[in-house]
Image: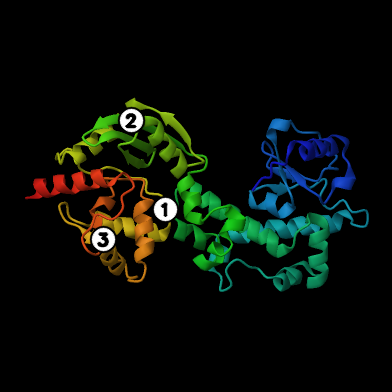
Amino acid sequence: MAQNPPARPQRAWWRAIATRDAAFDGRFVFAVRTTGIFCRPSCPARRPSTRNVSFFPSPVDALRQGYRPCARCLGRDASLGPIQRTLVHRICRGIEHTIESGEAAASSHPGRPTLQTLARQSGIGPFRLLRLFRRVLGVTPRQYADAVRLRRFKRSLREGGNVTTAIYDAGYGSSSRLYERSAAQLGMTPGSFLRGASGLEIRYAIVDSPLGRLLVGATPRGVCAVMLGKPDAQLLRELARDFPHAKLREDAHSVGAWARAVLARLRHDAQGGDIPLDIRGTAFQRRVWEELRRIPRGQTRTYSEIARRIGNSRAVRAVARACASNSLSVVIPCHRVVGKNGSLAGYRWGLERKQALLASEQVSSS
């Protein structure tokens, strides 16, 4: 993730960029949002506007955020000729093609080609290639491939893909390959990144309901949030917490029809039928939420029953966490899940509302 240094180091970094001070090369790189390129402080290119610049402690960090290395300043070692720099950039384009085209996901060694394969293709020894890569870009071929995979994974999520599909499309081979490094690479779990809705606009409306105030949020794909009963300001904070990177816009006109459909469902009205949903979560969360939607109105299931039904009887606590992180109350009926002894257990929107929802459904189903 981009680093925001304290004021004094930041001033020093800007001064280094302004004076093209090579003494700062290796201490940080700066990336320009308008070009998608990252550079060394000594880069001879035209100085960017301050509002378009992000700082990173290393090239790897900039690569992971989707920036490309500058062809002018990276690899300007006097002992390196244009042929060597061109070779490294050609290998980079080959790595990108392999991953972006899906060849990595289809291969028997997902996420590769290996250093040996790249060396054989380029006609030089693997250790020489490794040293050359480090001198030109400041990273290894493997680190560059990891950054490209992560970029493809993040783009797939932003475009509406689910976590599992995005993982395999990016060539990770298994979810554990990404999850074990997700904190360092994404700054959060893949599911949290997906739910964060980076670059997406969510329109919302807040209306009165039988259970207090009701917030309904929607993307172009459908309803992504149904939140109950707290003061408007708190509901907005909940929406911002669940989708921290999304642009939130109040729009009662465009969301009004979906808000009325949710209200009809709360009142058990036949008009509260199918509501298009934009469900965002991990593969595990989505399995839990789909199972919740299968619980008939007026009935309940225990957390352990849900765990068994999704094929993982030991995942009771994980099921409870998935219920607690559900942003689509009522539509995904996590209120129908109770403790082993029939107790109401927890509910994100308050036990009184959970009890009222269950009582209302039982009456309407009798």
Which residue position holds label 1?
Answer: 281
Q: Which colour scheme is used?
A: rainbow
Say few, some or many: other residues with alpha carbon within 10 Å of mark 1 (under 14 / 14 to 19 / 20 or more).
many
Packing grade of label 2 (10 A; few <14, some 14-19, many >=20) is many
Image mark for residue 339:
3
Label ID, residue 206: 2
Residue 330 sits in quarter: top left
- Residue type indicated by callout 1: Gly
Under circle 1, the secondary element is loop
Point 21% across, 47% down: residue: 355
Residue nearest the observer in this picture, 121 or 306: 306
Q: Which residue is drawn at 78% across and 55% down?
A: 137
**Pointers 3 and 1 in contact (C-beta within 8 Å):** no
Q: Position of residue 191 (x, y in %)?
A: 47, 54
| 313 displayed left or right of 363 | right
Q: Which residue appears at 47% of the width and 50% of the height? A: 194
Q: Which of marks 3 and 1 is in front?
A: 3
